[in-house]
Image: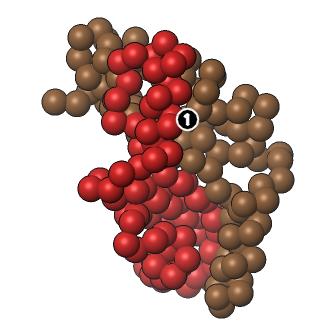
Chain colours: A brown, B red
Amino acid sequence: MSRYRVQVRVMPRAALLDPQGQAVEHALHALGFGDVAQVRVGKHLVLEVKAATQEEAVAQARTMCDRLLANPVTEDYELAVEATR
Amino acid sequence: MSRYRVQVRVMPRAALLDPQGQAVEHALHALGFGDVAQVRVGKHLVLEVKAATQEEAVAQARTMCDRLLANPVTEDYELAVEATR
């Protein structure tokens, strides 16, 4: 069993409103950053898993996203997995 | 003026407790993912800025992080800036 570091990026789906992103956009405009647009806010998670192979680590991470880390209706996710020393 | 897409990753500092990460870790253990450890939860923001050069876009994004997007005491951030078509 090796240790793998998993990076997960969870973002609201492009077709959906993102109220948190809109709030940040308004705040940036209020601070004088008038040229900012299209702000979207998601989550970034970093975690470590033990697995026999990198493929198994990816499969584990995907299951975690489907079951807990991302909302399949409103969010998309991307995974990156790398071995740790 | 060109448009640039800015990706910002904001993570809790390594030395600090991350209660949200701990909550996610406990939830993953409860779901049967017993081998998960070191969970940390941060934010990922995507936004568009207008700037004359890529360097100016990076400078703008850095100022936004320092003033609003990241808490300089508790969080670290990383930026990636690319031109959009």
Left or right: A43 with respect to A22? left
The image quarter containing residue B49 is bottom right
Can residue A80 be seen in the rendering of this structure?
A: no
Q: Chain of mark 1?
A: A
State the image coordinates of residue B64 (x, y, percent, origin top left): 53, 78
Left or right: A76 with respect to B77? right
| Residue closer to the observer: B43 or B23 | B23
Q: Which residue is outermost to the left?
A: A85
Please tell me which residue is depicted at 26% across the width and 27% down the height of the picture.
Answer: A83
Left or right: B70 with respect to A77? left
Q: Amino acid at mark 1?
A: Glu
Can residue B19 be seen in the rendering of this structure?
A: yes
Disc 1: which residue: A78
Please tell me which residue is depicted at 35% across the width and 18% down the height of the picture.
Answer: B35
Name the element at disc 1: strand
State the image coordinates of residue B66 (x, y, percent, origin top left): 46, 79
| Residue closer to the observer: B84 or A32 | A32
Please tell me which residue is depicted at 44% across the width and 39% down the height of the picture.
Answer: B22
Q: Quadrant of the C terminus of chain B?
A: bottom right
Q: Quadrant of the N terminus of chain B?
A: bottom right
Above-or-below relation of B54 to A13: below
Above-or-below relation of B1 to B22: below
Above-or-below relation of B38 to A53: below
The image quarter containing residue A9 is top right
State the image coordinates of residue B8 (x, y, percent, origin top left): 50, 61
Please tell me which residue is depicted at 54% across the width and 16% down the height of the picture.
Answer: B31
Label 1 Cα crowd, 10 Å radius (few <14 / some 14-19 / many 20+): few
Q: Which residue is outermost to the bottom?
A: A32
State the image coordinates of residue A48 (x, y, percent, origin top left): 34, 29
Counting labels gives 1
